[in-house]
Amino acid sequence: MKNLREENLVKNPVDGSLWIRTRRQKTGVAETVKLLPVPLSILNKYRGLSDDGRVFVVPYYKSVFEMLKTIAKHAGIQKNVTWHMARHTMATVICLSNGMPLEVVSSLLGHKNIKSTQIYAKITQEKLGCEIDTLASKLAKIEQFVPNIDLVVK
């Protein structure tokens, strides 16, 4: 976010949606991410305040970290909040628990190998229950084609 520049913001010629196109700092992997409504509104609110070509004015790491700790305290979060925790929460709670395929989450995280992403893919009870319910509803549709079990057993 700190290094995001105007040239990294591109419009999709088909639907006009705004995307971020850049390379991951750590791995050099190219990434393209569509801006959803909330990030787009944040972008529109703060865009243009920087005078050095960057999209956002970002405080120093230590300042941001202290702000993050203050926000966590006000929110009643007693864990030691870190950047990695935010990344893990995004991957598990926001993406995987809402049905996003592991391959897509892997791409969002910038992983070169899906095995790195599988670390984040702990299946929650809620997700497991939803998947079983989805399977049950699909199987219910084919019951008419299954022979009567009582007849088969006798």
Image: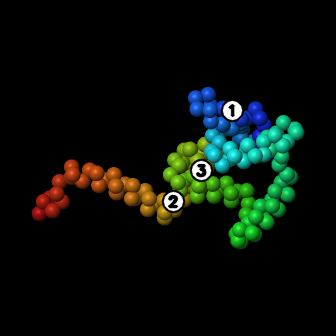
Q: On the image, which quarter does residue 147 sit in? A: bottom left
**Image point (34%, 57%), residue name:** 136
**Image point (81%, 40%), residue name:** 48
Q: On residue 123, which mark appears? A: 2
Residue 90 percent location from the top left of the image? 63, 54
- For disc 1, the marked residue is 10
Residue 124 percent location from the top left of the image? 51, 62
Counting residues from the N terminus, which is met first, the one under dot 3 or under dot 2? 3
Counting residues from the N terminus, which is met first, the one under dot 1 or under dot 2? 1
What is the distance, in whole Å, between disc 1 and disc 2 at their CAs?
Answer: 35 Å
Residue 88 showing in the rendered view: yes
- In the rendered view, does 34 fall on the left or right side of 125? right
Nearest the viewer among 15 and 8 is 15
Q: Do the numbered discs 3 and 1 sit on residues whose CB atoms are within 8 Å?
A: no
Dot in front, 3 or 1 = 1
**Image point (15%, 62%), residue name:** 150
Dot in front, 1 or 2 = 1
Asked which secondary structure carries label 2, the reply is loop
Question: Mark 3, residues whose alpha carbon is within 10 Å: few (<14), some, or many (≥20)?
Answer: many
Q: On residue 131, which mark appears? A: none
What is the distance, in whole Å, between disc 3 and disc 2 at their CAs?
Answer: 13 Å
Under mark 2, the amino acid is Ile
Under mark 1, the amino acid is Val
Nearest the viewer among 23 and 17 is 17
Q: On the image, which quarter does residue 103 sit in? A: top right
The quadrant the C terminus occupies is bottom left
Under mark 3, the amino acid is Thr
**Image point (63%, 40%), residue name:** 34
- For disc 3, the marked residue is 117
